[in-house]
């Protein structure tokens, strides 16, 4: 019984670790160019377009997961540089990116 529980636990931990690795890889491949590795948008496009620093607690607090998701799905209504990703990423990938954005922290 104990071993089964331990096995289950390590399996789910492995899955979680895998999902976050995927999200980080996705972020690097699809988002980092504009938003920066740390989400602070200290990039050429980030500065030019005044992209928000997503690591700021105030920004994190002001968004629901649904808000963030909608932005990724439909893009920005204000700035077409932030394109809709609904045809490029799966729902699971978009969810994992929402989770990833939640891990961005100001230091
Ligand atoms: C070509 C540059 C570019 C890429 C690539 C890009 N973004 Fe953006 N993103 C922007 C810009 C510009 C804005 C600001 C839009 C605005 O001010 O309305 C933005 C805004 C956002 C916002 C909302 C921030 C706010 O203003 O509240 C989220 C969330 C976001 N991006 C997520 C992502 C994710 C996730 C990816 C990768 C899948 C991504 N972006 C890729 C340019 C980009």
Image: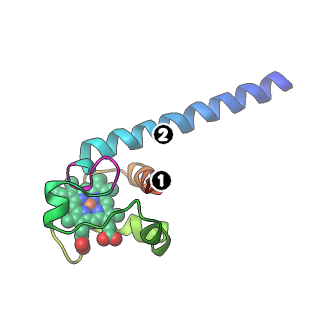
Task: Inspect this view and state whether residue 4 appears.
Answer: yes
Q: What secondary structure is marked by label 1?
A: helix
Name the residue that disc number 2 marks.
19
Asked whether 35 falls inside the magenta stretch, the response is yes
**Where is residue 83 shown, x and y percent of the image?**
20, 63
Q: Residue at x 23, y 77 (%)?
A: 77
80 and 58: which is toward the camera: 58
As drawn, 26 above or below 75: above
Kindly indicate the quadrant of the structure image that contains residue 51: bottom left
Q: Residues within 10 Å of mark 2 (few under 14, many from 20)?
A: some
| For residue 16, above or below residue 81 | above
Q: Could you tell me residue 104's position as x and y percent? A: 43, 53
Residue linked to disc 1: 99
**Furthest residue in direction bottom, as rendered:** 78
Q: Residue furthest front?
A: 107
Label 1 vs 2, first from the N-terminus:
2
Horizontal placement of 81 versus 5: left or right? left
**Residue located at (78% from left, 25% from top):** 4
Q: Check whether the beta carbons of the residues at disc 1 and disc 2 lie within 8 A of each other.
A: yes
Residue drawn at x 50%, y 71% as measured from the top left: 61
**Other-residue count near label 1 (Cα within 10 Å), few / some / many at <14 / 14–19 / ≥20:** some
The furthest residue to the top: 3
| Residue range of the region highlighted in magenta in the rendering | 33-39
Q: Quadrant of the N terminus?
A: top right
Q: Within the magenta stretch, is there residue 32?
A: no
Find residue 27 and report its horizontal and vertical position in percent.
32, 46
């Amino acid at each position: 019984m104990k071993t089964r529980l331990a096995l289950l636990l390590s399996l789910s931990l492995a899955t979680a670790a895998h999902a976050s690795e995927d999200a980080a890889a996705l972020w690097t491949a699809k988002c980092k160019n504009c938003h920066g590795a740390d989400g602070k948008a200290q990039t050429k496009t980030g500065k030019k377009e005044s992209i928000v620093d997503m690591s700021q607690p105030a920004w994190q607090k002001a968004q629901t997961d649904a808000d963030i998701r909608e932005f990724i799905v439909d893009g920005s209504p204000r700035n077409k540089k932030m394109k809709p990703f609904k045809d490029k990423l799966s729902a699971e990938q978009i969810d994992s990116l929402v989770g990833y954005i939640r891990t961005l922290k100001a230091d």
